[in-house]
Amino acid sequence: MSQHSKLLAGAAAVALLTGAGAAQAQTEVQWWHAMGGALGEKTNAIAEGFNASQSEFKVTPVYRGNYTETMTAAIAAFRAGEQPHIVQVFEVGTATMMAAEGAIYPVYELMADAGADWNPDDYLPSVVGYYTTPEGNMLSMPFNSSTPVMYYNKEVFEAAGLDPESPPTTWPELEEAARAIISSGAATCGFTTGWQSWVQLENFSAWHNAPFATQSNGFEGMDTELAFNSDLHVAHIGALQAWAEDGVFKYGGRRSDSAPLFYTRECAMYMNSSAAYAGVTANAEFEFGVAKLPYWPDAQGAPQNTIIGGATLWVLQGHEAAEYEAVAAFFNYLAEPAVQAQWHQDTGYLPITNSAWELSQEQGFYAANPGTDTSIKQMTLNEPTQNSKGLRLGSFVQIRDIINEELERIWAGEVTAQEGLDTAVERGNDLLRQFEADNS
Amino acid sequence: MEKRVVFRHAWLPYLLLLPQLAITLIFFIWPASQALYQSVLRQDPFGLRTSFVGLENFARLLRDPLYLDSFQVTIVFSIAVTALSMGLALLLAIMADRVIKGATSYKTLLIWPYAVAPAVAGVLWWFIFNPTIGILSYGLSLVGYDWNHALDGGDALTLVIIASAWKQISYNFLFFLAGLQAIPKSLIEAAAIDGAGPGRRFWTIIFPLLSPTTFFLLVVNVVYAFFDTFGVIHATTNGGPGQATTILVYKVFSDGFIGLNLGSSAAQSVVLMLIVIALTVVQFRYVERRVQY
């Protein structure tokens, strides 16, 4: 061996050693998320907290746009073999992710394979229930979950001669209150709603213990069919349609486009996600209260419990075992009471574990911020039934659009509630059959 | 008389054509054939299972009454966007052409909106027309019109037409202005001396001489309305209320990129491609005959 090649070999050995040393020091995993703005900062703070808590692993959070964009980007990356380890997927994408066997790494398997010490029983059943197999195994890690509640303008209630401390609990009471508000001139509109499919149909079904779809809302099989054209649903949507004519209800657009109606005092009540709390606090220049969603008192089994919206973290296949250990360690960190309680208190999203909820109580958070525990009380009101565990429907992003379209036709008075819901069910079932055919 | 160019080397013309051919191949033929291939398949989003379904994706589309409705919406939308953006741009160009003082600043200001991204343009108009906080909807309510594009299909279609047309006016304005400046002043002056008024001068001299520009812009604007407007719609109405603003290209986008239904989305883009090819042929065969170069 010449002097020259000896030198080279030595250099290579040093490079190898340092390379191995670096790999041992830090295993890096990619985390694609959809949290922009203030939420994005909180999200990054969690990753930084984890990175600072130990030296073995490093989580790199990457913002990939809104929920749809993030999910689409992760799927496209998977097709190209460039997928991240962890991706945040919204609840309506659940069935799509679940059906992708071979692409996803179920969380319960990951935790077992990594030998991680974790206690699945500490997680709130109504939060994780949405994301478990029928046997109760957790498929994805809940991250940001919320449930719809009702915000109401206390000042308007007072001006209309209503008690601001006792908001309506049933729909007939709500109608009465709305009419009192309108006739007194305190506001021109009774209530509006954000995310109409999620609040007025999906959660409405769970809250009244009525099926949204057959096969336990899709949990027990892909041969599920939509069922939200029952008499109860038609009566509810029909009532909203009638109310839309005299201002008891006002439609303000899809997603949260209706928020300004509440902020500008035009509507006295506003149903939307519990995570809208921060937005309402920032925009409402009046005193407001947070109440549970109303229910129909003559419906059997109401009120049951509401279901969640928001997103979970899915793990994608195709990486090294050591990297999955990092993912498992990160998930354990995420579920720590202090981390969860902080996230919950900062954002208005639900805590995912009992211990985080208890910690928030001990810290006096709910006493200092009245109304922030309405969501969790409402979600945990009763043991979830097969109608109130969640929804697991393929092509659900498109089905929600169909529901939006048909509800808009109903609000505009083009069709009756029965006709509109029948059409939505029929069009949605067509997509479910396609999804079933594509995934079997 | 036709001029013929004779190349000394047989390969030279091909070499000169090569860049254009490569661009066409990479940016048109390749994606188009991908779309054709995808349109006869059904696939789950992750690409784990693929099955050949023949023309099933197309058959499903043609059975869907809502898909057929969206043709109608697309036709109304495209005609309105093209007419509105070209009409206003022509008017502005004629005005700007006559301005002597501060002409450059007028022109710059009129060209600005073109630099705005479609989604931003959509959001801008969405705010202006917002039923609760919008300034224009407030103005409309004062004259007794209850504007609500979240509920009224006509209002929503008007909103996306205005937003899409507004964005394209600058582009059209630029071309019309260039076209106007290329018209010899002597022709117009001669007509004026013969006693032709401004209206008559416009229709007998300016408009015919502008026809190559107008024709070019017609093709570009129709293609714009068909293909380039989903950003505006996505940012404002999401195709709603009902399906009042779901034009064909928006459906391609939402089924493919939101619904992750690639087979159907590809089939729709093939249909759209055929329509635009047909439209372009019609324009070049029939409309171009009336153009005076």
Image (cartoon, rainbow, N blue to C red):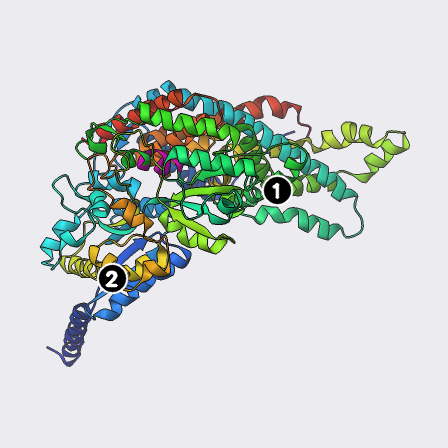
Which of the pair A324/A302 is nearer the observer?
A302
Q: Is residue A77 above or below residue B47?
A: below
Give, as a single range, the part of the protein colored magenta. Answer: A196-203
Q: Is residue A91 above or below residue B54?
A: below
Marks 2 and 1 sit apart, C-alpha to C-alpha, by 60 Å
Magenta region includes residue A200: yes
| Amino acid type at mark 2 | Leu
By secondary structure, the bulk of the magenta-drawn segment is best described as helix
Residue A8 in the image, given as x and y percentages of width and height = 17, 75
Which of the pair A224/A162 is nearer the observer?
A162
> What's the mark number on residue A359?
2
Residue B73 in the image, given as x and y percentages of width and height = 51, 26
| Amino acid type at mark 1 | Tyr
Residue B3 in the image, given as x and y percentages of width and height = 61, 33
Q: Secondary structure at mark 1?
A: helix
Mark 2 is surrounded, within 10 Å at the Cα level, by few (under 14), some (14 to 19) or many (20 or more) other residues, namely some
Q: Mark 1 and mark 2 in contact (Cβ < 8 Å)?
A: no
Mark 1 is surrounded, within 10 Å at the Cα level, by few (under 14), some (14 to 19) or many (20 or more) other residues, namely many
Quadrant where the C terminus of chain B is found in the figure: top right
Dot 1 corresponds to which residue?
Answer: B171
Residue at 76% x, 33% y is: B206
Quadrant where the N terminus of chain B is found in the figure: top right
Q: Are marks 2 and 1 on the same chain?
A: no
To which chain does the residue with label 2 belong? A
Q: Secondary structure at mark 2?
A: helix
